[in-house]
Amino acid sequence: MRYAILGDIHGNLAAFQTVLRDIDIRGGFDKIWCLGDVVGYGPDPHECIELLRQYEHLCVAGNHDWAAIGNIDTLDFNPDAAQACRWTGQRLAEEDIDYLQSLSLILCEEDFTLVHGSPREPLWEYILSIEAAQDSFAYFGTAFCLVGHSHAPLVFECIDDVIVYKEFADGADLQLGENRLIINPGGVGQPRDGDPRASYAVYDTGTRVVYHRRVEYDIEATQKRMEEQGLPPRLILRLGYGW
Ligand code: ZN
């Protein structure tokens, strides 16, 4: 069984389609594990939900998914994100709203927990530090936890109760073993680690390897769509820089 691990698609259809094609030519996948924020920021929220739902998948809710349907307010969002969020809400079809409303905050499959932010605070907490990772290990019962939200690929390993940060570089093959891990595959639709290429991972249950890949997509196509929709210039620019 092969799981495509996709986080933070953020309404970026060009990036999402490119990632799916890239996985296809590298052996394909059976099911998608989606780590939330399917919508928000990007120009094609409805199309991204529609595409995701064509596949067998599990998806947890992200803060942007909930904000777009009014489950949480946008007071904690910066003005650009809040504007994009309001725009997104207006673009969603009835079935999109029902779909986003149906998403759980935490799901488990195989020996993985799936959550958007952290298992302690599923919608809002960023796991970017050893300290945040240390606290998080107590909040999930499976061996491994997949998170998104920061849009930065990284791995935290718990070795005899000591947390070690490991780089999750493009092309890395992470062999699962005895130690518990928190893994972030990076962002599909709005990478923020200085590399503008779409970021994803695939888990192969046969080899017990999680591999990480970056793939170039047509950033200008997404930027053009955003311009046409009148989305904030800063959100359009940042895609080109990967921040
Ligand atoms: Zn996000």
Image: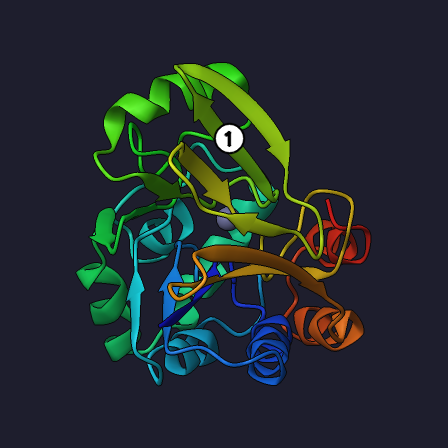
Quarter of the image with the N terminus in it: bottom left
Q: Which SS class for mark 1? A: strand
Q: Which residue is mark 1?
A: 156
Q: Amino acid at mark 1?
A: Phe
Image quadrant assignment for residue 35: bottom left
- Taking 36 as reference, is 113 above or below it? above
Q: Quadrant of the C terminus?
A: top right
Q: Residue at horizontal 31%, vertical 30%? A: 121
Tell whether 174 sits left or right of 240: left
- Between 199 and 235, the one lying in front of the other is 199
* Mark count: 1
Q: Is residue 7 visible?
A: no
Q: Depth check: 209 or 70 in front?
A: 209
Q: Residue at x 39, y 76 (%)?
A: 52
Left/right placement of residue 105 relative to residue 10 reads: left
Figure check: 223 above or below 82: below
- Image position, residue 66 (x, y; %): 31, 51
**Residue 154, image x, y percentages:** 58, 39
Q: Where is residue 232 drawn, in percent x and y?
A: 67, 55
Q: Is residue 73 above or below residue 219?
A: above
